[in-house]
Image (cartoon, rainbow, N blue to C red):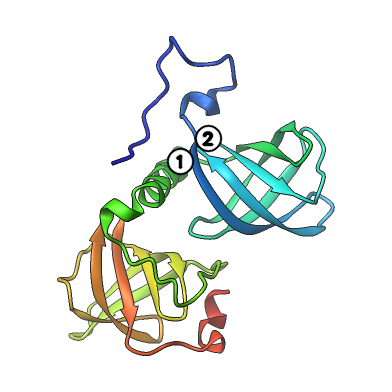
Amino acid sequence: MYSFQQASPAVRKPQPDQRSFQRVSVNLPGRLMLANHDEYECTVLDMSPGDASFICLGRPRIGERIISYVDHLGRIEGTVATLSDAGFAILLNATDRKREKLAAQLTWIANKHELGLPEDRRHNRLTPRNTSTDLTLDDGRRYPCRIIDLSMSGAAVDIDVRPALGTPVQLGHMKGRVVRHFQEGVAIEFSSVQSKDALTAFL
């Protein structure tokens, strides 16, 4: 299974500190906003907890700050470090805690097939802008959680507790059951296919 390791000094290139992690190929779609507030569709080709490489029609300047909402990852922001013919790379602006979360998310993406998480190809994954919500159990216990990714038939959430597989739960107003455990949380399958309107609160 993939795990983020700091690059060894022997092979580390003379890059800023953020490149102390090796990138993993992710190929994730998203949207980004440049400093002038223009928005564009984009794709993150590869990423580490410290930097990311984008392809995009938008052409930022070196040193420009961008904000992006990326499928499976949510909001990321950073400063443009390099430009290429098709896109650019950014150094992420993030706390140590945020970098730890990104490392876990990227590990989850890289190892998705080994972890046995449902691909859920029936419905497109949606990019949640509002990732914070609660997971409620049948007995009324409620736990704060963060949505990692979301579709009309299920979700993966970052949460500290691990309800047993098959446990009925409610994510926001959406009922479902726990179908997988993974490092950062649980995967939920909704009891019925949700309309996009039902997901509006998170989009």
Does residue 44 appear anywhere in the picture? yes
Q: Quick one: 98 or 84, which is closer to the camera? A: 84
Q: List x then y, in percent, for residue 83.
A: 76, 33
Name above or below for residue 184 compared with residue 136: above
| Quadrant location, the N terminus | top left
Q: CB atoms at circles 1 and 2 under 8 Å apart? A: yes
> As drawn, is 40 to the left or to the right of 44?
right
Q: Secondary structure at mark 2?
A: loop
Residue at the spot x=37%, y=45% of the render?
A: 107
Task: State how far apart marks 1 and 2 are (Cα).
Answer: 7 Å
Residue at the spot x=55%, y=41% of the render?
A: 46
Residue at the spot x=53%, y=69% of the render?
A: 130
**Which quadrant of the view contains residue 139?**
bottom left
**Which quadrant of the view contains residue 161?**
bottom left
Does residue 183 appear anywhere in the picture? no
Q: Secondary structure at mark 1?
A: helix
Residue type for callout 1 = Arg
Question: Neighbour class for label 2 at 10 Å: few (<14), some, many (≥20)?
Answer: many
Q: List x then y, in percent, for residue 4.
A: 37, 35
Q: Please give the residue where the numbered disc 1 appears in the rendered image.
A: 99
Counting residues from the start of the chain, the first of labels 1 and 2 encountered is 2
> As drawn, is 137 to the left or to the right of 25?
left
Q: How many marks?
A: 2
Q: Please give the residue where the numbered disc 2 appears in the rendered image.
A: 50
> As drawn, is 126 to the left or to the right of 134?
right
